[in-house]
Structures are given as C-alpha cells and as structure tokens.
Image: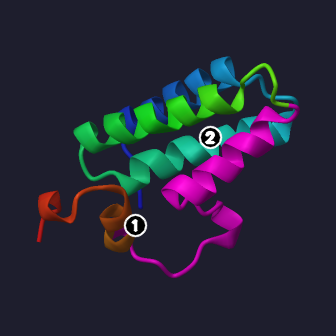
Amino acid sequence: MKTSKPVQLQVVITSGRLSKIIKPKDHCDRVTFLNVAKWIHETAQTDEQADELSNIVFALAKEANAPTSKNPMAVFMSSLKSQLGYIPPTKKSKESKKDALSRLFNKDTLPK
C-alpha cells in the first residue's frame, strides 16, 4: 500500500509523540515507534479511527512509563500486543485488515 505524504507525516508525528512519552534507548526503539505509528494509520480506515487508536496507544505508553517500571518499552509492547492485538511487522499473520479493525472498533461502524 502506497502511503500519501499526509499519512507519512502523521506516522512521523505519532512516532515523535511516542518518543516523548518513552525515551528511546537506541535505534531499535525508534524503529519500533515508527512501526507502531505506521500500524495505527494502516489499521484505521478513517482519521477519526486513527485519532482514537492513537489516543489509546499514547495512554498505554504513559502507563508503561510509570516511575516503578524498570523497562517501559517492554511493558508498552506487551500492553500493545495483549490489549490491542498488535503484531510486529516481522511476525505478521495473514489476518486481514478488516479482521484487525473488527477487534479494535465496533463492528457496526465498519463499512460493508
């Protein structure tokens, strides 16, 4: 799927916001944030869904970055996987986009 410049810009902005919540330790963390941001904008079909999903992801990042957290990045990724069904690009299954959306949003609001 070819992304338009506005979506690419949104991905960079979302990744930057995640980096402000959880400070990346290395290049791998920055790439992970880019992958998560890209996943948000690929999974959502509308800007409204992308905003809603982004807010959920930001909330998970803030929870993961609690003062008692020894490894915020690991906590964040675990939360993403367990609560939102995030699958890293290297481990993607053959799940369709519509199946992923069905898990995240009310099935009644999806286009048919």
Residue 100 is tagged as: 1
Tell me if 90 is positioned left or right of 71 in this view. left
Q: Which residue is mark 2?
A: 34
SS for callout 2: helix
* Magenta-span inclusion, residue 64: no
| Position of 65 relative to 94 (above/below) | above
Other residues around mark 1 within 10 Å, as few (<14) / some (14–19) / many (≥20): some
Q: Which residues are magenta?
A: 70-97
Quarter of the picture containing the N terminus is: bottom left
| Magenta segment main secondary structure | helix
In the image shown, does 93 or 57 lie closer to the viewer? 57
Q: Nearer the viewer, mark 1 or mark 2?
A: 1
Q: Position of residue 97 (x, y in %)?
A: 37, 69
| Position of 64 relative to 97 (above/below) | above
- Disc 1 marks a residue whose amino acid type is Ala
Q: Residue at x 72, y 23 (%)?
A: 66
| Quarter location, residue 99 | bottom left
